[in-house]
Image (tube, rainbow, N blue to C red):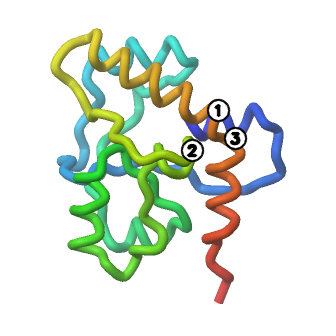
Amino acid sequence: MFRLALEDSRTAESWTVDSAGTWATSGMAVLPAVAVIARQYNLDLSQHRSKEVTGKILAAHDLILVMEAGHKEALLHEFSLYAEHIHLLSQVADERQYNIPDAIESFASMAGVAKDLHSLIQTGFDHICDKAHQLQRKPH
């Protein structure tokens, strides 16, 4: 969703936007219900495959956004070297700390999460971009 917002903004940024899961199993296709919901936001996830978070992935990104405090805590515990780059999406986009449940209990719960993510990215887009600029690593 952020990648589309970035493209829609017509900004000159050449950022890498990626996705990885705190407790993901690499190589898995998205759930069919998630693909249906994503299409409602003009996202084609048919080729998307899950990736587990690794130190190499974190090192390649200036800003790492997580949905839940538990995700942040797990990443900080395992990858403390990247602590200044790991943030709760709600805190960056909305300037308030709250969880966006990583819910897959039902189609309705997944659709609700997608709606919340879309809204947060749209309203907090400038805050997210500002934080990414602030944390941007200098090339070696």
- Give how far apart the Cα atoms at labels 1 and 3 are: 13 Å
Q: Answer yes or no: do the residues labelled 1 and 2 have beta carbons within 8 Å? A: yes
Residue beneath label 2, please? 93
Q: Residue at x 59, y 55 (%)?
A: 16
Is 137 located above or below residue 26 in the figure?
Answer: below
Is 98 located above or below residue 83 in the figure?
Answer: above
Q: Amino acid at mark 1?
A: Thr
Q: Horizontal and vertical percent for residue 62?
A: 55, 67
Q: Earlier in the sequence, mark 1 or mark 3?
A: 3
Q: Horizontal and vertical percent for residue 138?
A: 67, 82
What is the number of the mark on residue 83? none
What is the secondary structure assignment of the residue under circle 3? helix
What is the number of the mark on residue 6? 3
The image quarter in which residue 131 lies: bottom right
Q: Nearer the viewer, mark 1 or mark 3?
A: 1
Q: Earlier in the sequence, mark 2 or mark 3?
A: 3
Residue beneath label 1, please? 123
Is 136 located above or below residue 112 in the figure?
Answer: below
Quarter of the image that includes the N terminus: top right
Q: Nearer the viewer, mark 2 or mark 3?
A: 2
Is 110 located above or below residue 98 in the figure?
Answer: above
The image quarter in which residue 30 lies: top left
What is the secondary structure assignment of the residue under circle 2? helix
Quarter of the image that includes the C terminus: bottom right
On screen, residue 43 versus residue 108, left or right, reads right
